[in-house]
Image: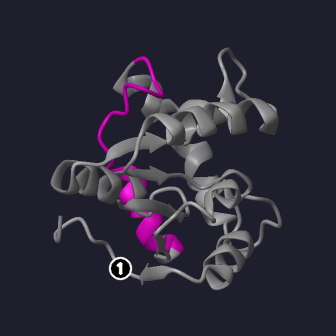
Amino acid sequence: MKKILIFGNSGSGKSTLAKHLARTEHLAHLDLDTLAWLPGSPPERAPIEVSAKNLSAFTRRESAWVIEGCYADLLELLVTEATEMIFMNLSVEQCVENAKSRPWEPHKYPSKAAQDENLGMLIDWIKAYQMRKDEFSFKAHQALFQAFDGKKTEYGCNIGSLV
């Protein structure tokens, strides 16, 4: 059974690849954004224990999956279960361009206009990827990738035309 983790900067193509793999490989798909945040505004990160419990419920329920997100702390919880890891390591410039052209994400925003209102903040977030020192950073993703002993792939360019 395939159990794939996909991670990288915002706008790197994680969701595009995960949806493709879910469709073509018949895998259950989980976007970590859906369980990493508490409902409400302003957004607030859910306690790791709550996210871990929901993540565990998903992996117990599904025998084959693809899980994607930028949360190294949550992804670390799955390293021993994963059969494959994919690091979407695109340049910041590519991620910014992808973010500008991304389709509406109805599971995150009530409308395309609401999503577009958030674009400036998202671009600033993307640009800080190499400098951050948190669980969303390049450094955290690189460490996660390097420590994994299973099958792993790193993409440094857009894979949208391949899927």
Residue at the image point whose x is 17% and y is 71% from the top: 162
Q: Position of residue 54 (x, y in %)?
A: 63, 31
The residue depicted at 46 percent of the width and 24 percent of the height is 109
Snapshot quadrant of residue 135:
bottom right
| Count of residue discs | 1
Q: Which of the two residues, 70 or 92, is positioned nearer the viewer here?
A: 70
Q: Quadrant of residue 154?
A: bottom left
Residue 25 shown left or right of residue 72 in the figure: left
**On-image quarter of the C terminus:** bottom left
Can you say whether 11 is above or below 83 in the image?
above
- Magenta span includes 94: yes
In the rendered image of this protein, does residue 109 appear above or below residue 126? above
Relative height, residue 15 to residue 111 (above, below): below
Q: Could you tell me the amino acid type at mark 1? A: Cys
> In the picture provided, is 7 more to the left or to the right than 66?
right
Measured as percent of width and height from the top left, residue 19 is found at 28, 49
Within 10 Å of disc 1 (Cα), the crowding (few <14, some 14-19, many 20+) is some
Question: Dividing the picture into quarters, in which one does residue 25 lie?
Answer: bottom left
Q: Quadrant of the N terminus?
A: bottom left
Q: What residue do we see at 45% from left, 65% from top? A: 95
> In the rendered structure, does residue 135 fall within the stretch colored magenta?
no
Q: Position of residue 12 (x, y in %)?
A: 44, 64
Q: Residue at x 69, y 17 (%)?
A: 41
Residue 62 appears at what percent x and percent y? 41, 40
Q: Which residues are magenta?
A: 92-110
Q: Can you identify the residue that label 1 sits on?
A: 157
